[in-house]
Amino acid sequence: MPKRERTPTTYSRITQPMVRDEKGGPLRAAGWDEALDRAARGLAAARGAFGMFSCSRATNEMNYVAQKFTRVVMGTNNVDSCNRTCHAPSVAGLAAAFGSGGGTSSYEEVEHTDVVLMWGSNARFAHPIFFQHVLKGIRNGARMYAVDPRRTSTAEWAESWLGLNVGTDIPMAHAIAREIIHAGLHNEAFVERATTGFAEYAAEVEPWTLEAAERVTGVPAAAVREVAHAYARAERAQLCWTLGITEHHNGTDNVRALINLALLTGHVGRYGSGVQPLRGQNNVQGGGDMGAIPDRLPGFQDILEDGVRRKFETAWDTVIQPRQGLNLTKMFEAMESGELRAVYCVGENPAQSEADSEQAVERLRRLDCLVVQDIFMTKTAELADVVLPATAAWCESSGTTTNSERRVQLVRKAVDPPDGARDDIDIICDLATRLGHPWKYADAESVWDELRSLSPQHHGMTYERLRDNQGIQWPCPDLDRIGPGFLHGRLWADDPDERGRRAPFGIVRHDPPVDETDDRFPLRLTTGRRLDSYNTGVQSGSYASPLRRGEYVELCPEDAERYGVRAGERVRVASRRGEVEAPVWIDPALRPGLAFMAMHFPDEVDTNKLTIEANDPIAGTAEFKASAIRIERLTRPAVGS
Ligand SMILES: Nc1nc2c(c(=O)[nH]1)N[C@H]1C(S)=C(S)[C@@H](COP(=O)(O)OP(=O)(O)OC[C@H]3O[C@@H](n4cnc5c(=O)[nH]c(N)nc54)[C@H](O)[C@@H]3O)O[C@H]1N2
Ligand SMILES: Nc1nc2c(c(=O)[nH]1)N[C@H]1C(S)=C(S)[C@@H](COP(=O)(O)OP(=O)(O)OC[C@H]3O[C@@H](n4cnc5c(=O)[nH]c(N)nc54)[C@H](O)[C@@H]3O)O[C@H]1N2
Ligand SMILES: [Mo]
């Protein structure tokens, strides 16, 4: 591979508020008073047409205050976060099956299990801490199988790799289910006692013989058969998935197809067996749990339930809209129609992270008022009317965060923030005060205690107990008890009354990616992550890394030859939305017809100019994992060469 000198993109911490005097004019430095007054005026003028983007990097306490600001000060439920671009289908799928939106197991359990299915997940790169537990599991004798179109670094550790075509996960899951049923390996007793809809499900998967699935997924029948038998015969098994499953126009259906496998085999609700969406940002689970989503109040309590709303209305002395707010995707659509006119964006960078980013930037530009509160000057902040410099939740402020195993942990301030930056919660409370709601919290703990008084599943987690126990997993309703760590043990209860609602099978169908490949756009582009960089590169771009090699369009050797391009050569990459230029990287882990790009280097290559914003009707998540592209050489070879 060619070596390439590069200067890393550098982002500077912001330490000074900024305002823009007129649309199209420059941002200029301002004092806190001026900036906050400007923000307050801009937001007040758009009451009823307001949206909040809340930060999944920041604490639970910050997310609690952000959603309360949205509901109480601005009178709307339009609050959301990066969960929408990410695991919203997992939350929707889990809630539909089990009634709550969290992964069912603890990390530790993967060390004490027999089979691990890593489905659409590159945990070796994206969840390295969890992956350490997986490696321990493998050392203890567990077999891991990877289901991913790319032979990833995670797949290198697997017993076998099922390299399926992008967007064919439902045929794969259905074929595994059919094989299990036909081999008589399903857990009939569990299906009978704890689930509903088995007959309909069995009929739905019946056409998906291993051979029929092979024609669609591209994976040899024998390899799928092995995985089906291993998963079904295992005493304990974990099914883990991430964005290879969720970032599709039918992500929720994909999630249901995987949960079905756990229901069929009874691999849920017991120590060592469960279903785990490995969540994205460090506190995206917590942000949702705190109600920074449009359909739930803190504690994942349903906003449509009168009793729930009444409880919060009394506590907050307000009236809560009795309907779900707009999710992030719908908020962007509402910017287009003019229904949404002001956005308060706290620690999100949608100008880069949204699919079809040129369209997203256009929509952000249309707003009457965009307030961005961040720790770095981002592409989104460059579009703002007011920029507010915050302290980083990680190490500069205190509070709690919640990881994918639902464990709430304390984070403590360890270093002083840069002069000029203010704490996220302080800034939001100051704005609330300017808008007629004089809020003041003495510290993060007092926010947490308010949350505990309103959320039964967090009630037992005082700061003191969190400190003493190195974190506690929800649900923890009692002050004197800690739960078993895994969820839905009730499904195994002998007494039918204790079992609660049964878990329904999801009846879902294959639906191929929206952006079809054809003669003009013959390559399937999937996008994702690298070990060395983080999301839009804002936080990871500012330090040098010996690993980081910048953005490339990755192709397999056969495709490089087919299109006559060499390693390191700059090419044009075009989709139906837009085009970018990028150098070629040749990666034998890809299969013919499949290209890969990351999303970490917007200054060099804005990958999201290419992606399609076709999205899941239930969860609103875009199909980041499946676009159709072509590559073109920038210079034609000279005649005769
Ligand atoms: N180093 C690093 N770690 C991170 C992040 C980061 O930016 N950098 N970001 C964090 C965040 S916000 C998140 S959400 C997580 C995401 O973590 P992951 O979801 O593991 O990361 P991705 O690379 O986006 O996608 C995972 C895999 O999906 C595969 N895939 C693509 N299409 C399909 C398909 O149709 N079917 C199947 N089965 N698989 C498919 C891709 O080949 C890829 O290997 O990572 C978190 N951790
Ligand atoms: N092509 C493609 N696009 C994708 C994806 C993909 O797989 N492919 N994945 C999607 C996914 S899963 C995600 S999660 C999104 C990520 O999308 P974003 O959330 O928009 O991206 P981040 O880079 O994580 O932005 C986080 C921001 O929070 C700021 N921040 C960090 N800590 C704090 C804090 O304590 N306070 C405040 N106020 N700000 C803070 C950071 O400086 C940064 O600007 O991208 C999505 N976009
Ligand atoms: Mo994410």
Image (spheres, helix red, strand yellow):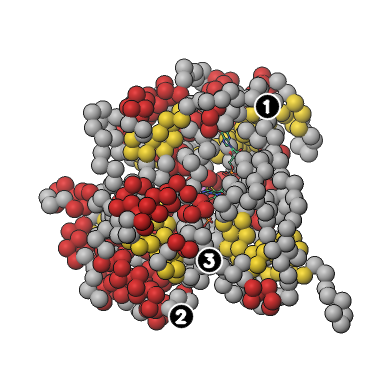
Q: Earlier in the sequence, mark 3 or mark 1?
A: 1
Residue at mark 1? 15
Q: Which amino acid does label 1 sit on?
A: Thr
Relative to 493, 608 lies left or right = right
Write down the residue under mark 3.
Answer: 150
Query: In the figure, 305 relative to 584: above or below?
Result: above
Tell me which amino acid carries mark 2. Arg
Alpha-carbon span between mark 2 and mark 1: 57 Å
Residue 387 figure quarter: top right
Please provide percent x and percent y for residue 33. Answer: 66, 19
Residue on which disc 2 sits: 215
Of mark 2 and mark 1, the one earlier in the sequence is 1
Q: Could you say where residue 415 lies in the image, as x and y percent from the top left?
A: 56, 25
Q: Quadrant of residue 598?
A: bottom right
Q: What element carries label 1?
A: loop
Q: Who's the residue at 37% across and 44% down the image?
A: 405
User: Does residue 2 lie above or below 304 as drawn?
Assistant: below
Q: Residues within 10 Å of mark 1 (few under 14, many from 20)?
A: many
The residue drawn where x is 76% and y is 52% is 5
* Circle 3 Cα neighbour tier, 10 Å, few/some/many (<14 / 14–19 / ≥20): many
Q: Earlier in the sequence, mark 2 or mark 3?
A: 3
Secondary structure state at the residue bearing disc 3: loop
Query: Going 38% across and 68% down the picture, which residue do you hit?
Result: 173
